[in-house]
Amino acid sequence: MAAEAFAMHLDRRTALAALGFLFLSSASGAASTEGEPTVPIRLVETALAGRGGALPTESALRTAIVRAFDLDAMTRGVLGSQTSTAGQFSRFREVLTDRLVLDMLARRRREGRGTLEIVRTRTIGAGEWVVDSRIAIRDRPLRSASWRVREDQGKTLVTDVMSSGTSLVRSLRSANQASLRKYGLDGLITRMDGRNSRMRG
């Protein structure tokens, strides 16, 4: 039991490492237009900055994440080879979205705002890019993050984020594998929902 808890703690830290840059303010005042690879990154960035320096609300951040991330693709990536019904897939996507929101809020609350600078945008395929960025947070080492972005019906959506060599999707998949094997998909959804409820206090 202790070993399982320790492994879950390590997996959670790995996943949070990939989320740790998402509480930012922009280093650039340049405006973006719909369809540009940086648009979804700026959406999340703006939501996490909050209004007047205040912490963002869960509702505002969730709205930004739903608009900025390809949550269907990320859900498929986290589930991996696990089969699911349409209902299970929808419920898992909801608890996964809640986890992303609550983990980002927790880091934002604990570490404050940072400053994001877009370094470069690389085309890696038709309608697909990697956006490299640097994140500065007071009293902490400079971080880097690379965002995988793809175009879908004229909109650009984040499909994964890499930070310090860690993929957010792969980390979340790894973090959930033990529970998935032990409890099944319905059990994992219940456990994730319970964790999210506890984080809300």
Image (spheres, grey):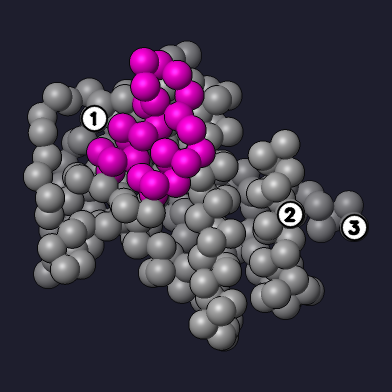
In the rendered structure, which amino acid carries the disc numbered 2? Gly
In the rendered structure, which amino acid carries the disc numbered 3? Met
Q: Secondary structure at mark 1?
A: strand
Residue at point 17% right, 25% down?
28
Q: Using residue 8 as the reference point, say whether residue 48 is left or right of it.
A: left
Mark closest to the chain's N terminus, 2 or 3: 3
For residue 1, which numbered disc appears in the image?
Answer: 3
In the rendered structure, which amino acid carries the disc numbered 1? Glu
The CA distance from mark 2 to mark 3 is: 19 Å
Residue at point 84% right, 55% down?
3
Q: Secondary structure at mark 3?
A: loop
Query: Principal SS element in the magenta part?
Result: helix
Q: Is residue 44 magenta?
A: yes
Closest to the observer, 101 or 130: 101
Closest to the observer, 18 or 33: 33
Image location (x, y in percent) of residue 116 = 29, 29
Residue at point 68% right, 58% down?
192
Over which residues does the magenta segment extend?
Answer: 41-65
Give the answer, above or below, for where 116 lies relative to 148.
above
The CA distance from mark 1 to mark 2 is: 36 Å
Callouts 1 and 3 close, C-beta under 8 Å: no
Mark closest to the chain's N terminus, 1 or 3: 3
The residue wearing badge 2 is 194
Q: Using residue 127 as the reference point, say whether residue 101 is left or right of it.
A: right
* Classed neighbour count for the residue bearing mark 2: other residues with Cα under 10 Å, few (<14), some (14–19), many (≥20): few
The residue wearing badge 1 is 117
The CA distance from mark 1 to mark 3 is: 43 Å
